[in-house]
């Protein structure tokens, strides 16, 4: 009678907490170890082609997914870098060290709040972000044995825990009620397409206080590419639905079955319906196909990524639709053409649809592989075969079915140029072909619906990638269709960026243009410090008056012994001038400088220079302010007049306490040989007359100070203009200045 179980001779040593060092070497035949090792192995045999059957297996395959125990251990490794490179690499600028610190302290709600505050699709991005190319690629622990922090896994963990809490998103309690907000916050806003860019944009607009936001989606499901083209085993549908519900918590409406097309929604129709701002986030709806597939159909065995992946998603993602779809029925050999992330999704999905072998065939080599390492490794692990340097030339058919493809071998030279070698032809047998060559907008019905937007040579809308504004000021764009984003997280950031500039547009805020200070043209081709002149084409600040009044209060609080001079500028309006001046005095300003001289595009809007060239205007404004405040008032004069002393005299007659001389000189710094100005801004290379400053205007400023002092002895003059040293300052004092402004 055979023994069912028995104890090996050294059972006591095996079970001992402190095993002894063996006295003798173990002797066991290799053949015996090979025979029995499969009983102990937890991974697949590397030589086994059928060890794991992926058919209809849509369970999570992400190696980054973490349990609570693993998440706490991983969070404990983070260095919490002061100038964290991970955050600098994140398109949405997540405060990564902050949410990791919260996880380490088991504050999972705090971690999720930090994530979702900057990225409303934080769970989606935690699951599908190519972190090796983003945050983890900059991690300071990349070189240690354990490798970089698993940031994507930690992000996924934190938001998944928050998802289980079932806490709704609420409107910011600090916002005024909708009834107490200006009417502009009740403006109708339309977003076309319910993908990552639109979800992000709508969420941020709702957080800002807008109450009439509608997303129009052509399909009968939401989520865009996240739902239709990223497989269930990478991004479950309940994740997308969770993020949609958070958005809806803020009052955003979603209408399904509404497409951007001539027959349904167009830019013109939306405008007529009263929509004040429009965001286009429809992705790239059409597949890019090679000409050899012109007559290929699904009945013959041909799919594009745009036809294959949505079918897989509908059949595998529970809750995506109320229909009863079926997976595409594949069998035998499947060839996937392309080497991007979408091609990898097609390949791994094909295995789950019945394919026995999948070949990923692409034109270039592994050095030019477009898919991120995470995607490539997943396909490799599932035993997809990679075949580089092959370009499809002809589809082979028999009896109305695909039987294979004829390829030409390709070569890539040292300059990156690819050539095809027609003498080296290869035939690969196949039962199905899936083309994943990218996507585009090809339907005229969609493009015509976007009129009058201007298009680029790539048939995409012209977009300012800072504001996400198209050629139409009320139409914004983001995601794939904008032509710049290649990842879900970048599309999310497009929506975030667009929401802010849509807000600026709807509130009619003047957006500040960062100062464009360039070297002058009067001192040769010199660069760096020591330049003699500069041209400033800075426009008005985007900060509100409230911001500056608070700044004055803070300065006086922190430096009570210092003199703070408030600089004011507005058009020729008594009420505005007196209101600004009174508030400046109440904030604690010691004196007021009247900007009647700014040449940086302000004259065109009746401010700055427009108020300072007519003596009577200067006199009147000075009187208004002296009536309103008790602190000293100094008009800042422009040198862009025939006789600056006459302007100073008018200020004195208006009871001003003195003047500032001078502001910058209006000028155009230079024009290039091709006819474009320098400096120039934007795609159209436009410019404006700016203010020339620096040593170049010192002679003009000295003359101005001298002229005023000669005409109006003992009238205080604050001198400014090219004062770069004590010696130069002395020159201005000798010319009659009472005090110097050094900037």
Image (cartoon, helix red, strand yellow):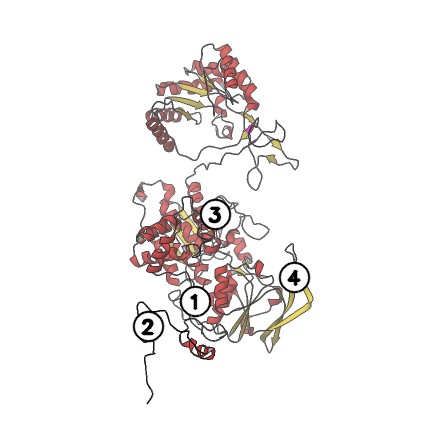
Mark 4 is surrounded, within 10 Å at the Cα level, by few (under 14), some (14 to 19) or many (20 or more) other residues, namely some
**CA–CA distance in space, label 4 to label 3:** 41 Å
Question: Which one is in front, 186 or 733?
Answer: 733
Q: Are marks 3 and 1 in contact (CB under 8 Å)?
A: no
Which picture quadrant has residue 7? bottom left
* Residue under numbered circle 1: 314
Marks 2 and 3, the one that precedes in the sequence: 2
Question: Mark 2 — residue?
Answer: 13
Check disc 1: other Cα within 10 Å, few if <14, some if 14-19, many if 20+: many
User: Could you tell me how far apart the alpha carbons at marks 1 and 2 are, in whole angstroms?
Assistant: 56 Å
Whichever of callouts 1 and 2 sits on the residue coming sooner in the sequence is 2
From this viewpoint, is residue 272 visible? no
Q: Which mark lies nearer to you, 1 or 2?
A: 2
Q: Nearer the viewer, mark 1 or mark 4?
A: 4
C-alpha separation, residue under disc 3 versus residue under disc 1: 30 Å
Sooner in the amino-acid sequence: mark 4 or mark 3: 4
**291 and 238: which is toward the camera:** 238
Q: Are marks 1 and 2 in contact (CB under 8 Å)?
A: no
Q: Residue 411: which disc?
A: 4
Reading the image, the residue beneath label 3 is 476
Using the numbered discs, state the Cα–Cα distance from disc 2 to disc 3 in whole angstroms: 72 Å
């Amino acid at each position: 009678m055979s023994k069912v179980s028995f104890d090996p001779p050294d059972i006591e040593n095996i079970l001992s907490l402190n095993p002894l060092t063996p006295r003798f070497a173990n002797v066991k035949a290799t053949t015996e170890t090979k025979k029995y090792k499969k009983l102990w192995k937890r991974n697949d045999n590397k030589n086994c082609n059928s060890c794991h059957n992926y058919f209809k297996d849509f369970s999570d395959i992400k190696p980054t997914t973490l349990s609570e125990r693993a998440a706490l251990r991983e969070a404990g490794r983070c260095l919490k870098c002061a100038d964290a490179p991970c955050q600098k690499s994140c398109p949405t600028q997540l405060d990564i060290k902050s949410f990791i610190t919260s996880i380490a302290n088991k504050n999972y709600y705090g971690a999720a709040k930090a994530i979702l505050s900057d990225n409303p699709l934080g769970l989606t991005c935690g699951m599908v972000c190519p972190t090796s190319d983003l945050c983890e690629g900059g991690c300071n622990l990349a070189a240690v044995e354990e490798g970089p922090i698993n940031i994507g896994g930690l992000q996924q963990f934190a938001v998944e825990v928050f998802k289980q809490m079932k806490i709704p998103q609420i409107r910011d309690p600090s916002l005024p009620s909708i009834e107490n907000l200006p009417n502009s916050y009740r403006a109708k806003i339309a977003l076309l397409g319910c993908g990552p860019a639109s979800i992000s944009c709508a969420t941020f607009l709702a957080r800002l206080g807008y109450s009439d936001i509608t997303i129009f989606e052509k399909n009968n499901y939401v989520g865009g590419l996240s739902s239709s083209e990223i497989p269930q085993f990478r991004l479950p549908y309940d994740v997308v639905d969770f993020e949609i519900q958070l958005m809806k918590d803020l009052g955003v409406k979603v209408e399904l079955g509404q497409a951007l097309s001539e027959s349904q929604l167009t830019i013109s129709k939306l405008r007529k319906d009263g929509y004040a701002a429009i965001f286009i986030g429809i992705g790239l709806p059409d597949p890019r196909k090679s000409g050899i597939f012109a007559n290929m159909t699904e009945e013959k065995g041909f799919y594009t990524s745009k036809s294959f992946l949505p079918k897989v998603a509908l059949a595998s993602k529970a809750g995506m639709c109320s229909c009863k779809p079926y997976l595409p029925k594949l069998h035998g050999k499947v060839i996937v053409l392309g080497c991007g992330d979408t091609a990898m999704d097609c390949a791994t999905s094909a295995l789950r649809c019945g394919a026995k072998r999948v070949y990923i065939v692409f034109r270039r080599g592994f050095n030019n592989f477009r898919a991120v390492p995470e995607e490539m490794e997943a396909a490799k692990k599932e035993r997809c075969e990679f075949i580089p340097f092959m370009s499809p030339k002809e589809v082979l058919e028999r009896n109305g079915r695909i039987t294979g493809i004829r390829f030409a071998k390709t070569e890539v030279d040292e300059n990156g140029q690819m050539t095809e070698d027609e003498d080296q032809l290869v035939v690969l047998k196949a039962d199905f072909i899936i083309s994943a060559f990218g996507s585009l907008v090809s339907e005229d019905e969609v493009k015509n619906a976007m009129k009058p937007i201007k298009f680029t040579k790539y048939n995409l809308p012209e977009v300012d990638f800072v504001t996400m504004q198209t050629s139409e000021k009320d139409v914004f764009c983001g995601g794939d269709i904008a032509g710049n984003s290649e990842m879900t997280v970048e599309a999310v950031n497009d929506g975030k960026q667009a929401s802010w500039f849509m807000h600026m547009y709807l509130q009619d805020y003047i957006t500040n243009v960062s100062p464009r200070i360039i070297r002058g043209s009067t001192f040769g081709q010199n660069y760096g410090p020591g330049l003699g002149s500069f041209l400033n084409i800075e426009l008005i600040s985007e900060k509100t008056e409230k911001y500056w009044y608070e700044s004055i209060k803070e300065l006086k609080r922190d430096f009570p012994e210092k003199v703070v001079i408030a600089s004011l500028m507005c058009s020729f309006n008594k009420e505005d001038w007196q209101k600004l001046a009174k508030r400046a005095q109440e904030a604690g300003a010691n004196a007021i400088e009247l900007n009647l001289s700014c040449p940086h595009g302000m004259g065109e809007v009746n401010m700055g220079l427009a108020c300072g060239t007519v003596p009577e205007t200067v006199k009147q404004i000075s009187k208004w302010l002296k009536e309103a405040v008790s602190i000293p008032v100094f008009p800042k004069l422009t040198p862009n007049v025939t006789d600056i002393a006459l302007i100073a005299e008018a200020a004195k007659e208006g009871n001003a306490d003195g003047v500032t001389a001078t502001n910058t000189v209006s000028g155009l710094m230079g024009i290039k040989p091709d006819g474009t100005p320098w400096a120039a801004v934007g795609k159209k290379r436009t410019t404006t007359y700016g203010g020339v400053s620096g040593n170049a205007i010192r002679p003009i400023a000295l003359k101005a100070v001298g002229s005023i002092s000669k005409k109006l002895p003992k009238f205080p003059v604050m001198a400014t203009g090219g004062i770069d040293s004590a010696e130069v300052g002395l020159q201005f004092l000798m010319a009659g200045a009472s005090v110097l402004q050094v900037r």
